[in-house]
Image (cartoon, rainbow, N blue to C red):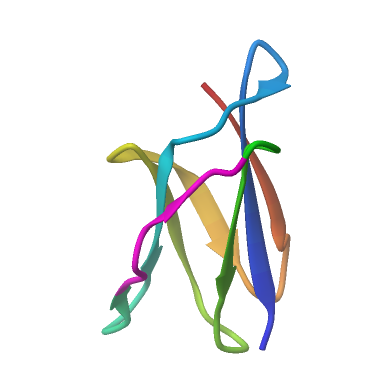
Amino acid sequence: MPTIRVTVLRDDEPVSGHRVVLGISGAGGMTSHELTDSNGAAEFEVEDGQEGDVFVDGSNEGHWGSYSATDITVNL
């Protein structure tokens, strides 16, 4: 299972406490939310071949795919 790591930054510095959710394309729905840690990171285990959108505090911040980038950086 791939791990998707989302890092949230503000002014190029990691920020904690932001709510991150992965939307999964097709009938996959959404993951449970994770809060960013002191390194600005939230991690999710996904199935091979899944893809979808990254949501931070309810805003769509981009696309993810387990066959492409598994480390995603979001700049607020």
- Up-down: is 60 above or below 54? above
Q: Position of residue 16 (x, y in %)?
A: 54, 33
Residue drawn at (49%, 44%), measured in percent from left and top?
Answer: 62
- Up-down: is 62 above or below 38? below
Residue drawn at (65%, 10%), measured in percent from left and top?
Answer: 11
Q: Position of residue 50 (x, y in %)?
A: 52, 80
- Up-down: is 37 above or below 42? above
Q: Position of residue 32 (x, y in %)?
A: 34, 68
Of 33 and 27, nearer the camera is: 33
Magenta span: 30-37
Of 55 and 37, nearer the camera is: 37
* Quadrant position of the N terminus in the picture: bottom right
Q: Position of residue 6 (x, y in %)?
A: 61, 50
The quadrant where residue 9 appears:
top right
Magenta segment main secondary structure: loop
Q: How many marks?
A: 0
Residue drawn at (27%, 40%), measured in percent from left and top?
Answer: 58
Task: Say whether residue 64 is left or right of residue 26.
Answer: right
Residue drawn at (72%, 17%), measured in percent from left and top?
Answer: 12
In the rendered image, the residue lying farthest to the front is: 38
- Up-down: is 17 above or below 12? below
Specify whether residue 71 is painted magenta. Answer: no
Of 9 and 48, nearer the camera is: 9
Task: Say whether residue 19 is left or right of residue 38.
Answer: left
